[in-house]
Amino acid sequence: MKVLIINSGSSSIKYQLMLMPTAQVICQGIVERIGSQEAVFVYKTDNDEITKIMPVMNHKEGLEKIAKLLVDPKIGVIKNAGEIDAVGHRVVHGGNSFSKPTIINQTVKDKIKELAALAPLHNPHNLEGIVLAEKFFKNAKQIVVFDTSFHHTIPTKASKYAIPNKFFDEHGIQVYGFHGISHKYVSEKAIAYLHKKESKIISIHLGNGCSMTAVHNGKSVDHSLGFTPSNGLIMGTRSGDVDHAIIFYLVDTLGYKLDEVKTLLTRESGMMGLTGYGDLRDIQEEAEKGDKNCLLALEMNAYRIKKYIGAYAAAMNGLDAVLFTAGIGENSNKLRDLVCTNMEFLGLELDAELNDLRNPEIREINTPTSPVKILVVPTNEELEIAKEAYKILTFSLKEH
Ligand code: AMP
């Protein structure tokens, strides 16, 4: 079964064509910086690797280019679009409606659209990817996998906000949790690595968006993002935790409009707001050159993560492992070092040499005597989506 995975973000589309159930990758790539004259288009197969800088002004153009390359007579990997059996999509917000992956129909699309109000940076692009894929790959089943589904096991004591009950009961205002596809994939990897089904793990996903999940016996029991993907850790352009009274102050005293506050907190804050840089690599480079704002931003970032580690260890009454994943978590030895230093009281002992090594596999970066394992676990959201899409399709074929 050929499954195409589409992970349609705010300015990028990651894609992978996989043969299931073997999970053999037939081709993969990314279109980055969508919306610019200098978008980066990457296409990799076993035989070819192409990186092109070209104008890609919107997601439709990006997906058109991907679909065209897949069937290209010279470097394509399929003869026609009809060869694709299923397209698996990542959707960020599934609210209370979706605790499992699901096959797309109009009701599902309407619900994803409705939930766009809660994930304005993500759901509209996810939906656009679905609508375009339906057009390009007419014979394929379209399947959606939600970032929120993994967190349906969070108990009410952790998912409910202390505001009047009617907002929880009638309006669904609660913690939903995000990055669930990644947290599920990496925590399952860690559990298999540790040979420990009964385990207390803290999964730390640090990419453009950042979040932490307390995973007790394989289930999400608490999570740092909340009703929307805004709460918790300091992110690329999102502030994470702030005193909500700041919003009233900005509006009532400083004269900001609500839309401006939204933009400020979601697109102009976080590491960008603190340093002027959105990419952690730039921030690390400037910090090394002595830029005080960059240095402080790194320290603030790590400090926030430390606090959540403490909170989640307390919530689970213990800790077997913390794991780092995603672009920053997998690559920034600097940030891992800042997070894990002076955490011996909790059983975390980082091995500096292991931390500095680069290795694309799951690996330990703790000392041999560290009571708590510190792991780097490369995430693979595309593989997780492909596995779920395969599962749901084979199940639905058996049913008919
Ligand atoms: P993701 O959302 O998982 O694709 O992660 C994207 C982020 O990973 C970017 O903002 C970069 O700051 C960060 N990143 C990627 N490579 C590195 C690296 N070698 N060192 C530090 N950060 C990195």
Image: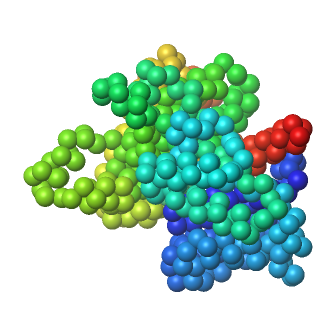
Residue 323's spot in the image, x, y percent? 58, 37
Q: Nearer the viewer, residue 69 or 346?
A: 69
Q: Nearer the viewer, residue 262 or 185?
A: 262
Residue 378's spot in the image, x, y percent? 65, 47
Q: Quadrant of the C terminus?
A: top right
Residue 392's spot in the image, x, y percent? 78, 41
Classify residue 59 as left or right of residue 84: left
Determine the residue located farthest toward the top in the rendered image: 317
Determine the residue located farthest toward the left in the rendered image: 253
| Residue 137 appears in view | yes
Q: Nearer the viewer, residue 386 or 314?
A: 386
Q: Nearer the viewer, residue 323 or 286?
A: 323
The residue positioned 49% from the left and 28% from the top of the image is 222
Residue 41 sits in quarter: bottom right
Q: Is residue 47 above or below residue 14?
A: below
The residue positioned 15% from the left and 48% from the top of the image is 249
**Color theme of the render:** rainbow
Q: Is residue 397 above or below residue 370?
A: below
Residue 165 sits in quarter: top left
Residue 76's spot in the image, x, y percent? 84, 75
Determine the residue located farthest toward the front in the rendered image: 106
Q: Is residue 310 above or below residue 107?
A: above
The residue positioned 74% from the left and 25% from the top of the image is 195
